Image (cartoon, rainbow, N blue to C red):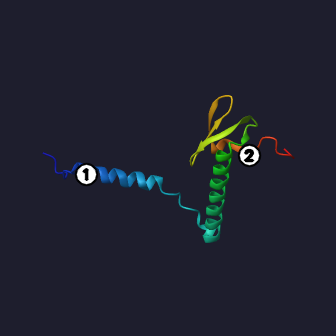
Amino acid sequence: MSDEPIQSASATQSSALAQVRRRRSPAIKPSHLGSHGAEQEAFQHQAELFYMQKQIQAQTPMIVVLQDGQQIEGCIEWYDRDTLKLRGRQKTLVYKSAIKFMYKKGDPGQ
């Protein structure tokens, strides 16, 4: 017989949930950013969320330019922390890390 304690199912589930929460928690910011850097990053995140929501609601045609120069045209259907879903000729899921920049289709100066 094993000397290890027997865990109940609920203890195992709560342990697994704690691990998921730790993985989902925001990454620890580098110390050189300080509180001002963290505030600025939070502001930029909120600005991104506001911009995305505005474009989704207006169904604005967008041009997304990827790091490799490829351009994808479409309306933003939804987004999450890491990805963006565009609806154009076809539905495309794009990693945000692959995006160089994006702009509204027909914007002057582009």
Relative to 89, is 43 above or below? below
Tell me the residue at 16%/51% (across/down): 3
Q: Residues within 10 Å of mark 2 (few under 14, many from 20)?
A: few
Q: Residue furthest front?
A: 58
Tell me the residue at 36%/52% (across/down): 17
Q: Position of residue 1 (x, y in %)?
A: 12, 45
Q: Position of residue 13 (x, y in %)?
A: 30, 50
Give the quadrant of the C terminus: top right
Q: Which residue is mark 2?
A: 101
Q: Position of residue 55 (x, y in %)?
A: 68, 47
Q: Is residue 70 left or right of residue 108?
A: left
Which labelled disc corresponds to residue 75?
Answer: none
Q: Which residue is mark 1?
A: 10
Q: Is residue 93 left or right of residue 15?
A: right
Q: Residue furthest left?
A: 1
Real-space CA distance between mark 2 and mark 1, rounded to the nearest whole angstrom: 46 Å
Tell me the residue at 61%/62% (across/down): 42
Q: Residues within 10 Å of mark 1 (few under 14, many from 20)?
A: few
Relative to 98, is 46 above or below? below
Counting every numbered tag in the picture gives: 2
Q: Position of residue 89 (x, y in %)?
A: 68, 28
Q: Is residue 17 left or right of residue 93?
A: left
Q: Secondary structure at mark 2?
A: strand
Q: Secondary structure at mark 1?
A: helix
